[in-house]
Image (cartoon, rainbow, N blue to C red):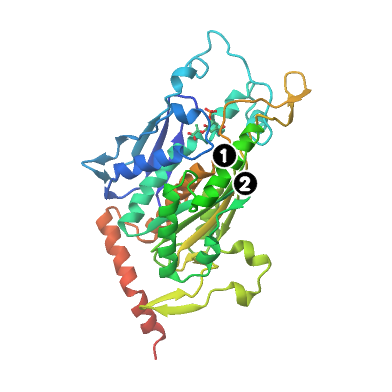
Amino acid sequence: MSHLRFLTAGESHGKSLTVIIEGLPSNLPFNFELLNLRLAQRQEGYGRGGRMKIEKDTAEITSGVRNGKTLGSPVAIIIKNNDWENWSEIMSEFPFEIQPGKITVPRPGHADMTGVQKYNFSDIRNSIERSSARETAARTAAGTVAEMLLNFFNIKLFSFVESIGGIYSDYEFYAKLLTSKNEPAITLLEQLQALADQSELKMPDTEQTFTIIEKIKNIKKAGDTLGGSVITAAVNLPPGLGSFVHFDRKLDAAIASSIMSVNAVKSVTIGGGDYGSTLTGSNFHDEIILENSRYLRNTNMAGGIEGGISTGMPVLVRSIMKPISTLMMPLKSIDLKNNSEIEARRERSDFVAVPAYSVIARAALSFTLAQFFLDKFSGDSMEEIGDNFSNFNSKIFSRIQENFGG
Ligand code: EPS
């Protein structure tokens, strides 16, 4: 498997987030603008809470990049938490001089209870800090560096909101993507992304945006929260990423894992997987066609992956984020200090984070695709990888003719 990997560190209200990306080749032009754009986009979206007014995420590159290009050494990125100054005593690394108030009531749906049970904590604050979705800023940074690598080879990434609180976009765009050929799907994705980039909800539909914002306002007033679904895609991938030879080399399984690991994600579907329980085989599967010396598909229910291997069609992923679990109209819980029944704790939080999640999902998909890309076309410099990539790509068709031609 590819050596490309990353590690993040950082508590939500600690000093900063750190990410180290290891296994990048040398000579990748570093797109500082794209990195800060993705970090800023992750902070946007109607429905965020007070914290996003405090933070202004920017990436400080502390190693691995010189003169605008990667060196092949680990790339380290720091993102400061502006909120730290309000938390420096509560989050101090040194023994407390005065013990801050302990949190003893776990919120349903959060990692509060599971963290306490697993790590033997005496303060739920210790569960909250690392399980917070603040960590996704660091993951977005890692994924955006991967996106730079993919962009270099003309592989483009897309991600936007499909629905929030059960209200879908007017356009039946996911069904269209699943039933389109390669080129029309790329054009449609470009159009949808351009629309989504202008929307406060990162949703390619201005009419529904208004209805949904009204719904979020009402939900917020009622002390409740909403989830939603996101479509994430990659185009211009070569065929041949991933493998069927072993379960841990399947591209679809790896994508599902990296997307599902984003906070609050409860469902991931590749292509038209959701329709697999109702359609017949002849309606589900994509016919193989020959277009400009490329074996492609007439439709894309497989979501660009067959047998755990990329087909060359767009990779299509639909995922679902559950509603935020911090409620201002709390559910019941138990106070761990005396086991009495009590309402769960209210605290500052987002009401809807689906637009932000769409940015994180793109980063998660990018990182996994870059791992599989480097696995197939491995090399120490971008030039060496480029040679391996074009050598494979330019010969796919002719090799099949040699192998099967009469
Ligand atoms: C989060 C709770 C909120 C969110 C946070 C995720 O933070 P706070 O507890 O400081 O109000 O704003 O998201 C981020 C900080 C972020 O950068 O996305 C949670 O409990 O997961």
> Tag 1, which secondary structure?
loop
226 to the left or right of 368: right
Quadrant where the N terminus lies? bottom left
Outermost residue toward the top in this view: 97
- Residue at (41, 59) in percent of width and height: 191
Q: Residue furthest bottom?
A: 406
Pointers 2 and 1 in contact (CB under 8 A)?
yes
**What residue is at 74 percent from the left and 28 percent from the top?**
333
Question: Which disc, if any, is residue 342?
Answer: none
x, y percent for residue 110: 64, 34
Kindly identify the amino acid type of the residue bearing the numbered disc 1: Val
Please tell me how crowded label 1 is: few (under 14), some (14-19), or many (20+) other residues with Cα within 10 Å.
many
Relative depth, front residue between 274 and 146: 274
Distance from the alpha carbon under mark 2 to that under mark 1: 9 Å
Q: Is residue 287 above or below residue 252?
A: below
Kindly give the residue lying farthest to the left in the view shown. 67
> Residue 219, how many percent across, how many down?
64, 37
Q: Is residue 371 visible?
A: no
Tell me: is circle 2 under 8 Å from ligand 1: no
The residue pinned by badge 2 equals 165
Quick check: 288 left or right of 322? left
Nearest to the observer: residue 206 or residue 241: 206
Q: Residue furthest right?
A: 340
Q: Identify the residue under disc 1.
A: 352
Q: Nearer the viewer, residue 181 or 397?
A: 181
Where residue 284 sits in the image (x, y, percent)? Answer: 60, 72
* Residue 245 vertical placement versus 211 (above, below): below
